[in-house]
Every structure is written in structure tokens, then in C-alpha cells.
Image (cartoon, coloured by chain):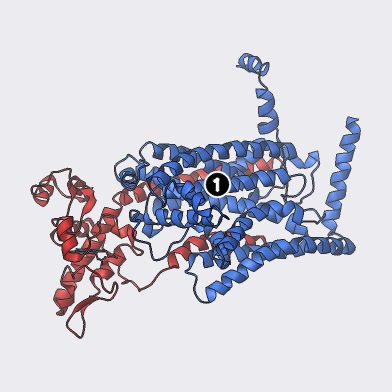
């Protein structure tokens, strides 16, 4: 009975956040294994800069942050062009122009991978959901009525080889944006391994100590 | 050293305090691991205060800067991400620990005489904790922060006659804005110290009535052991287990307790499609929504939190040991736990279709269980007395009371 209580209580407590997470799992997201290698992230940075940053800001990432994803100093210099080394990555379209073009200012992308359920998978699915419908109009079936025009012209890549190539680019962009949303994630997991390892040893020692002390009572 | 001690002792009961309340403090030897959670709650409180103070050094309580300052902490402050994730995960850990602590008290009947004041100070702590968490949630100034605060402060509109004025007064404006943020920040910084004060009262009460124990029977001296080293060792072992789970979330799933929408800066013009409170408010939120009328819902929600305080009156049984020796009460307890979980689930979902009914039924069961308790506990008491208590309880009660009497005789 005690174990039933225990497991009920703990699983119950875990239920709430999970229920929260399930609460609006609307459209299913693509089920893909991301390649999170630094080459992929780096390729993603270039692709994002050349396409997404035409319209979107990446305001929490500065050019100098690119050094953290294995850019060399000279690569950053080429990448940033005339922009300052420590300036945030900004869109090349001004908000006023964007407002006129799209009726809205495109959202900043630096937290996008955290701001949508599914994170990188959401971004990947969004960009691979553009299709030409029967009337010859491009539409997005993950986000019907989206104001973002198919940025990589995915809808028109019908030939299989080129579509595969484009999917690779999209996955690169997705993992780059995932990094941008949480640049300390690598450091965090790395430190976490040590912390948890240390705690397991420490807790085991506490357990032995507790047993030893309590054995005096027998 | 001993000279210094005696100097202090002549002026302040330091040695006496250490001896009576820490090292030699008599503690029932049969306490299970469920009794670790009070200590854990104290630990999390300290953790929240320390991490919170460090966050406050970098945070900017200004509607136009708050969101950016949190990202600044996450990205540029040394180990800022760690401090922030400890604090955000700590809030959830605090509630998890407190809910288990409360469940233990309910299960083992620790709220019963002579521990009513412990239970009521605990109730006060729960309210303070909820208020602190609610105000803290506004500070990152994300979409969910903003709209959660908007929805909850809006509930005060139900106040008779002066509802609208109360809402404006709470928010410092017609809607949530900079004025709300700054006052919530000020209070969010203040409340933890009020919690510390109430915790001290809670502990003074504890050290006067002593810990309850799984048998529910006051144990004689021979069955009490000094707090140190036995329970210090046990508490530290429990703390280790807790920290492993806690750190797993901090380092590997820190976004688990953070709504995706809260990574979008607050936008007063754009309501999120689905506003959900933090998980620890979900059961109460579900009760609020189950009542179609606003005032009724608010009253039901308030009552659902406050009704715990009535437990010492509602439980009329004289059988010791909480649910352990009381089969009816035990059933009630488990039904309650399941009911709260169902309510939590309903609270997380949009209120449509069958879930509305499930929510209403669960709300009815929630209050029904409390309403049933007085009758049931009297019935159960009679039934158990007629049947005779389980042999082990009888033996325990006898031997312990004999022991306590013997001691009393010796003293006179």
C-alpha cells in the first residue's frame, strides 16, 4: 500500500506539467533525428543569415557569439560584413518596411526554439510544410494563413534530390536556432554530468553513514 | 572556546538551545522517510532566497527591460543560467515538497491535537508560498506571466460592490503594466522573509509539541532518540536523493516547468490561445472553472485552499495513527489524492466537452470528501472500537502509556 501511495504521489505530481505540455499538442510535428554537430550548426548559421535574417532579427545573438560555435575570427569578420563585432544580428529589412510588406514585424528568432512547443522540430516542420495547393497557391499546412512567404521555396522543390538537400539545410537552420535559443545548453549538460555524478557518490556516502549511525540502535 | 561559551550562556541560552533543540531534541525513532519533507522544504526555502537575491542583482523590474534582463542573465552573467534555472525549478520543487509534506500530514493525521497550530501555521505558509510564486511568475514578463496575472487579478472583480476598484488597486492601473511589475517585484522580495518568520513559529510550535509519528501514539522516552546524529544523518541522505532529482531537472530539463509561451515577451495586444497557470495551481484553477458563476468560482477556489485548516475539526475520530489504523479514512485519503490529480489534469486542458463534467464531478468529490469526514470518522470510530483495535495498536498504546505514567510517578 505504501508503495502504491508513493508512486501515485510522484507520478501524480509529474502529471501536471505533462498535462500542461499535452494541453495543446495540435498538429503532429516531423519526427526526425537532428544532427547537432558543430558543422551542422555552423552551416545553419550561414543559411539563416542568408535567408531568415533578411526578414527576422536574432537580437540576443551577437556576431562575437559565433566564436562559440567554432567560427574563426576571420570567418566572423566575413560573416558580419560592415556590422560591428559586438552588435546583435539584425534583420536587413526595417520594421517599417516589414510592417508594410507583411502587415506585421516578423518575430525575433533568437528564442524561437524555446517559444514553440517542439522547439527545433517545430521550426523544421514549419519550413517543410509549404505546399502548392490545387489552385496553384503556396500554403502552409502547419500554420495555415501564415504571413511568412515560403522562405526557402520548399513548395517548389519537387525533384527528390534537391528536396533532400533543402531538408538538410532546414535541419541545419533548426539546430542553429536551437543553439541560439539556449547557447549555454552544452555547458549546462557538461557541468550537469559532473554535478549529478558527484551527488550520487555523496548520497551513497550519506546512505552508508546513516546506516552506520542507525545501527547503534540495534 | 568553553570560556567564550559560558560567557555567552550567561547572557543568552545558546548551549541550552543547541542541546535541547538540535543535538538532544527527542525525536520518535519510528519516523519514516515521509518525515524528511519538512527539512527539505526548509532547504528549498533557503535555496530560493539565495538564488533569488543573486537574480535580483541582475534583474530589472521595468516592463520595457524585464524580459531582456532575464535573457541577459541567461546568456551573459556568469552562471546566470544556473542561478535562474535553480530558481525557476526551485519554485516547482518547493510546491512538490510542500504537497508531499501536506499529504504526509493528512495521511498520518499529524494535524490532530495537539498539533493544530502547526497545521494552521502550515496553512499560512501555503498561502504565503502561493502568493510569492504567483508574483514571481510575473517577473520574467513573458506572455504567460502577463496573461496569467491578468486572469488571476481579474478574479478580484468578483468582490461585491467594489470589484472594479479592487482590481485597479491591485494592478496599479487598468491592466497589468509597469506599476504591477514593480509592486510584484517588491512583494516577491519581501514575502520569502515573511515565510522565514512563519517557519520559525512553525518550528517553535513543533519543538513544543514534538514530531508526530506513523503510529499516531505519543511515544514514551525509550522510543525517542536524539535528533543528532540520527536524524541529521537521515535528513542529509534524503537531501542527497532530492538534489539528484532536482539537479536532473536543472541541468537536463530546465524548460520542463516553463511554458513555451513564456519565452515570448509580454504582449498586451495578443492573448495566447490557451492561458494556463503553473502546474501547482492547476487543481485549484480547475475548481475555479468548474463553477459557472465568477463569484461562486472564486469562493470555491478560495475554499478549496483554505478548507485544509478545518481538518482538526472535521476529523472526529479518536483512533490514533491517521490512515494507518483507519480503513475508511485511508480510502478517503486515496480518493482525495486521485481526485486532486484528475483536477490537475482538467485544469491544464481547455474547458470543453466531457472535461467540463469531469471537472465539476471532481470538484464535487473534492468538497464532498471534506463534508463526509465528520460523519465517517465518527462511524469509523464506533465501528473500530466495537471490533477492537488491531492487537499491535492496543499493545503499543498500553505499553507507551504505562511507560509515560511510570515516568510521571518518578518525577513526583
Report which residue position mark 1 lands on: B129
For image coordinates 26% across by 67% down, the residue present is A124
Residue B125: image location, x then y, percent: 60, 45
For image coordinates 12% across by 49% down, the residue present is A80
Residue A97: image location, x then y, percent: 14, 59
Residue B87: image location, x then y, percent: 44, 45
**Looking at the rendering, in which quadrant would you find the N terminus of chain B?**
top right
Quadrant of res B380: bottom right
Judging depth in this view, the residue of B262 and A48 nearest the camera is B262
Quadrant of res A106: bottom left
* Any part of residue A131 in sight: yes
The image shows residue B223, relative to residue A124, as above or below, that is above
Quadrant of res B376: bottom right
Judging depth in this view, the residue of B273 and B171 nearest the camera is B171
What color does chain A have in the rendering? red
Chain that is coloured blue in the picture = B
* Any part of residue A7 in sight: no
Q: Say left or right for A27 vs A65.
A: right
Q: Say left or right for A36 vs B409.
A: left
User: Badge 1, how many Cα within 10 Å: few under 14, some, many 20+?
Assistant: many
**Looking at the rendering, in which quadrant would you find the C terminus of chain B?**
top right
Amino acid at each position: 500500500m505504501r508503495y502504491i501511495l508513493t508512486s501515485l504521489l510522484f507520478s501524480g505530481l509529474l502529471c501536471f506539467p505533462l498535462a500542461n505540455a499535452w494541453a495543446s499538442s495540435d498538429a503532429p510535428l516531423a519526427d526526425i533525428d537532428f544532427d547537432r554537430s558543430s558543422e551542422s550548426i555552423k552551416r545553419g548559421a550561414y543559411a539563416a543569415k542568408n535567408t531568415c535574417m533578411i526578414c527576422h532579427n536574432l537580437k540576443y545573438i551577437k556576431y562575437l557569439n559565433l566564436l562559440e560555435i567554432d567560427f574563426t575570427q576571420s570567418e566572423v569578420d566575413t560573416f558580419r560584413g560592415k556590422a560591428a563585432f559586438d552588435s546583435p544580428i539584425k534583420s536587413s529589412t526595417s520594421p517599417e518596411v516589414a510592417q508594410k510588406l507583411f502587415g506585421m514585424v516578423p518575430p525575433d528568432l533568437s528564442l524561437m526554439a524555446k517559444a514553440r512547443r517542439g522547439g527545433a522540430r517545430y521550426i523544421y516542420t514549419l519550413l517543410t510544410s509549404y505546399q502548392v495547393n490545387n489552385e496553384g497557391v503556396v500554403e502552409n499546412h502547419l500554420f495555415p494563413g501564415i504571413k511568412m512567404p515560403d522562405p526557402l521555396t520548399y513548395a517548389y522543390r519537387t525533384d527528390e534530390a534537391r528536396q533532400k538537400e533543402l531538408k538538410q539545410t532546414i535541419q541545419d537552420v533548426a539546430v542553429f536556432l536551437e543553439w541560439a535559443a539556449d547557447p549555454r545548453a552544452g555547458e549546462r549538460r557538461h557541468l550537469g554530468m559532473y554535478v549529478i555524478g558527484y551527488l550520487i557518490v555523496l548520497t551513497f556516502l550519506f546512505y552508508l553513514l546513516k546506516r552506520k549511525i542507525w545501527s547503534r540502535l540495534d | 572556546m568553553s570560556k567564550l561559551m559560558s560567557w555567552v550562556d550567561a547572557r543568552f541560552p545558546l548551549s541550552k538551545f543547541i542541546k535541547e533543540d538540535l543535538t538532544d531534541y527527542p525525536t520518535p525513532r519510528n519516523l519514516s522517510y515521509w518525515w524528511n519533507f519538512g527539512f527539505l522544504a526548509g532547504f528549498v526555502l533557503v535555496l530560493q532566497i539565495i538564488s533569488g537575491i543573486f537574480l535580483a542583482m541582475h534583474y530589472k523590474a521595468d516592463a520595457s527591460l524585464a524580459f531582456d534582463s532575464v535573457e541577459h542573465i541567461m546568456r551573459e552573467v556568469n552562471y546566470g543560467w544556473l542561478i535562474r534555472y535553480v530558481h525557476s525549478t526551485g519554485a516547482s520543487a518547493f510546491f512538490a515538497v510542500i504537497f508531499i509534506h501536506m499529504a504526509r500530514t493528512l495521511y498520518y493525521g499529524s494535524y490532530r491535537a495537539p498539533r493544530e497550530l502547526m497545521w494552521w501555521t502550515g496553512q499560512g505558509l501555503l498561502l504565503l508560498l502561493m502568493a510569492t510564486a504567483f508574483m514571481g511568475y510575473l517577473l520574467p514578463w513573458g506572455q504567460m506571466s502577463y496573461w496569467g496575472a491578468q486572469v488571476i487579478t481579474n478574479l478580484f472583480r468578483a468582490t461585491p460592490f467594489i470589484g472594479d476598484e479592487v482590481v485597479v488597486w491591485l494592478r496599479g492601473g487598468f491592466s497589468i503594466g509597469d506599476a504591477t511589475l514593480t509592486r510584484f517585484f517588491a512583494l516577491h522580495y519581501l514575502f520569502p522573509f515573511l515565510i522565514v518568520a512563519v517557519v520559525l513559529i512553525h518550528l517553535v510550535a513543533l519543538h513544543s509539541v514534538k514530531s508526530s509519528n506513523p503510529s499516531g501514539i505519543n511515544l514514551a522516552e525509550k522510543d525517542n532518540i536524539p535528533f543528532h546524529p540520527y536524524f541529521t544523518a537521515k535528513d542529509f541522505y534524503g537531501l542527497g536523493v532530492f538534489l539528484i532529482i532536482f539537479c536532473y531537472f536543472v541541468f537536463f530539463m530546465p524548460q520542463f516547468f516553463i511554458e513555451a509561451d513564456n519565452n515570448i515577451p509580454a504582449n498586451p495586444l495578443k492573448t495566447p490561445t490557451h492561458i494556463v497557470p503553473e502546474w501547482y495551481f492547476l487543481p485549484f484553477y480547475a475548481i475555479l472553472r468548474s463553477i459557472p458563476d465568477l463569484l461562486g468560482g472564486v469562493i470555491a477556489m478560495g475554499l478549496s485552499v483554505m478548507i485544509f485548516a478545518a481538518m482538526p475539526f472535521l476529523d472526529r475520530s479518536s483512533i490514533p495513527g491517521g490512515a494507518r489504523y483507519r480503513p475508511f479514512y485511508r480510502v478517503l485519503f486515496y480518493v482525495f489524492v486521485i481526485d486532486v490529480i484528475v483536477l490537475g489534469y482538467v485544469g491544464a486542458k481547455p474547458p470543453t466537452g466531457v472535461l467540463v463534467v469531469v471537472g465539476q464531478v471532481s470538484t464535487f468529490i473534492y468538497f464532498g470528501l471534506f463534508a463526509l469526514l465528520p460523519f465517517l470518522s465518527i462511524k469509523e470510530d464506533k465501528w473500530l472500537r466495537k471490533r477492537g483495535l488491531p492487537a499491535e495498536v492496543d499493545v503499543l498504546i498500553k505499553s507507551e502509556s504505562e511507560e509515560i505514567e511510570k515516568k510521571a510517578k518518578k518525577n513526583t
